[in-house]
Image (spheres, rainbow, N blue to C red):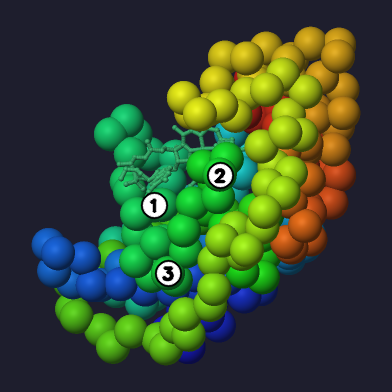
Amino acid sequence: MKAIDNYIHPHGLLLRGALHPPEGGTVVLVGNAGPGLWQAFARARRAEDRPHELDAWTRRVMEPVAAAVGARVVFPFEGPPYHPFQRWAMAAEGLKPSPVGVLMHPVFGLWHAYRAALLFDARLPLPESAPAPHPCDSCDAKPCLSACPVGAFTAGGYDVAACRAHVRSAAGEACRAGGCLARHACPVGEAYAPGQAAFHMAAFAGLS
Ligand code: B12
């Protein structure tokens, strides 16, 4: 695990836990939180990779890492069918979904993501992961559920069409420029810098 960490750290990527899936072997998750990824990506991004610049950068970084450590690498953007990154994350780090669906991290809040998984045939020893309380359990106000300007988070689930239409509209400037207002309403963790938040929102809304 230390070797993987040494390879990914200069690229602003973090080890996000590991698990033994039922089909055997070991899955090691690689992701981001905090400003590291955005700084590394800003130095190495290439205009010719548009419209999927971050995905192309992730492949360029992670394929040599996988070769160096003798693993296969898979990505969250490959699909459908998609690799079960959220299920893996729940098993690897004990995370649980927030009321808005994105997994809640006790330190990073809703501001973290998964970029790749290294698949090893061997059953490697897993890193220690100390279980932390799920912050949403003690959050009575649940501001995430009422902050969305178009009420996209309902008892029936996440209204993707309403969210996307708003983000693309003139009225959606705040979400577009600064990131999802529901995620901003959560008191846990530190939000992405505005440039990064705007980049992800443009990708989500099909504006990039
Ligand atoms: C398709 C997709 C979307 C679609 C969602 C369509 C829909 N109707 O929900 C769209 C494009 C709308 C979308 C939007 C966003 N997404 Co998205 N998306 C994905 C993607 C590519 C595939 C998801 C999938 O189908 N997986 C396949 C199933 C089999 O995998 P799974 O892990 O087993 O899925 C399980 C969990 O999702 C779990 N689960 C989900 N919700 C809940 C709730 C409860 C209560 C429980 C128990 C379980 C549970 O149940 C699933 C079945 O087992 C994943 C990446 C990936 N490969 O997983 C990202 C991913 C889920 N998205 C992510 C993010 C961050 C977003 C956005 C916030 C992006 C943004 N704008 O900044 C938005 C908003 C989402 C929101 N508010 O909920 C992150 C979530 C990271 C995290 N912290 O959890 C992921 C993991 C991508 C990543 N690179 O990290 N997304």
Position in image of residue 37 (x %, y %): 69, 60
- Residue 21's image quarter? bottom left
Residue position marked by numbered label 3 in the rendering: 94
Cα–Cα span, label 3 and label 1 = 13 Å
Tell which of 183 and 74 is nearer to you: 183
* Residue ID at (48%, 85%): 130
Q: Does the residue labelled 2 lie within 8 Å of ligand 1?
A: no
Position in image of residue 178 (x %, y %): 85, 38
Q: Does the residue labelled 1 lie within 8 Å of ligand 1?
A: yes
* Residue ID at (67%, 12%): 165
Tell which of 161 and 72 is nearer to you: 161
Q: What residue type is labelled 1?
A: Phe
Which is closer to the viewer, label 3 or label 1?
3
Confirm or deny contact between disc 2 and disc 1 (CB under 8 A).
Answer: no
Q: Dot 2: what SS?
A: loop
Badge 1 crowding class, 10 Å Cα cut-off, few under 14, some 14 to 19, many 20 or more, is some
Badge 3 crowding class, 10 Å Cα cut-off, few under 14, some 14 to 19, many 20 or more, is some
**Measured along the vertical axis of the image, is residue 64 above or below residue 100?**
below
The circle drawn on residue 99 is 2
Q: Earlier in the sequence, mark 3 or mark 1?
A: 1
Q: Which of marks 2 and 1 is nearer the N terminus?
A: 1
Position in image of residue 16 (x %, y %): 49, 70
Which is closer to the viewer, label 2 or label 1?
2
Cα–Cα span, label 2 and label 1 = 18 Å
